Image (cartoon, rainbow, N blue to C red):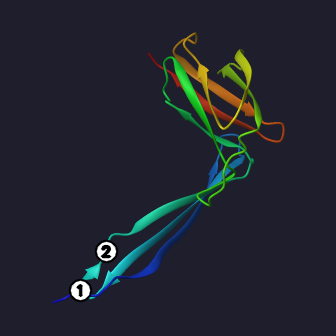
Amino acid sequence: MRCKLYRYRPDTYLGTNWVSQSGHRLRKYFQVGCTGHNNCGDGIMGTTYISISESGLDYIVSPNPASATVTISVVPAVSGAGNLPDINAVYDVSVHDMYGVLQSRKEYSGDRFAIPVHNLKDGNYLIRIDNGKSVSVKQLIINR
């Protein structure tokens, strides 16, 4: 039997809200999938994710857990749609321990920057980023 070319059909559209412990909605993630099929059967579903930040500011902390330096990569409020972060933005970045005590604070610009954390003791911390319009807080783990 000779297989014909695949035809594609959308399979899944899924939306979920991620909620912080304080009850604030952080991001919506949408999964979009597509499966090819023909007379030889169905293919494997290809999936992509599109996310929308309701705070207007989101970033990735890596590595996490960290030991010496973490890299902050700012992502656009809507990702997966060809949007780019503002490379001219200035961010007030502060690191707090779990008691809220300020450990470090500095301004950074661009969409990617490194924060030294070698002076922090092992434990859990909060990274707070403020771009003047929105504030976002994420957990950082120091583990050596």
The residue depicted at 68 percent of the width and 46 percent of the height is: 85
Q: Which mark is residue 138?
A: none
Pick the residue in front: 95 or 48: 48
Placement of 111 over or under 32, stated as above or below: above
Q: Is residue 8 left or right of residue 103?
A: left
Residue 132 point in image, percent of width and height: 84, 36
In this view, 119 is above or below 46 = above
Q: Nearer the viewer, residue 77 or 127?
A: 77
Q: Earlier in the sequence, mark 1 or mark 2?
A: 1
Q: 58 and 141: which one is in front?
A: 58
| Position of 96 relative to 12 (above/below) | above
Going by the image, does 16 lie left or right of 48? Answer: right
Residue 19 picture location, percent across and down: 65, 48
Question: Quarter of the image holding residue 74?
Answer: top right
- State whether residue 82 is above or below residue 106: below
Q: Is residue 137 left or right of residue 14?
A: right
Residue type pointed to by label 1: Cys
Displayed quadrant of residue 58: top right
- Pointers 1 and 2 in contact (C-beta within 8 Å): no
Across and down, in percent, residue 133 comes to 83, 41
Foreground mark, 1 or 2, reads: 1
Q: Is residue 2 left or right of residue 73?
A: left
Q: Quadrant of the C terminus?
A: top left
Q: Which mark is residue 3?
A: 1
Q: Which residue is at 45% across, 81% downward?
A: 9
Q: Mark 2 belongs to which amino acid?
A: Gly
Q: Nearer the viewer, residue 112 or 26?
A: 112
**In what quadrant of the picture does the N terminus appear?**
bottom left
Residue 43 is marked as: 2
Query: Looking at the rendering, which quadrant does residue 82 occupy?
Result: bottom right
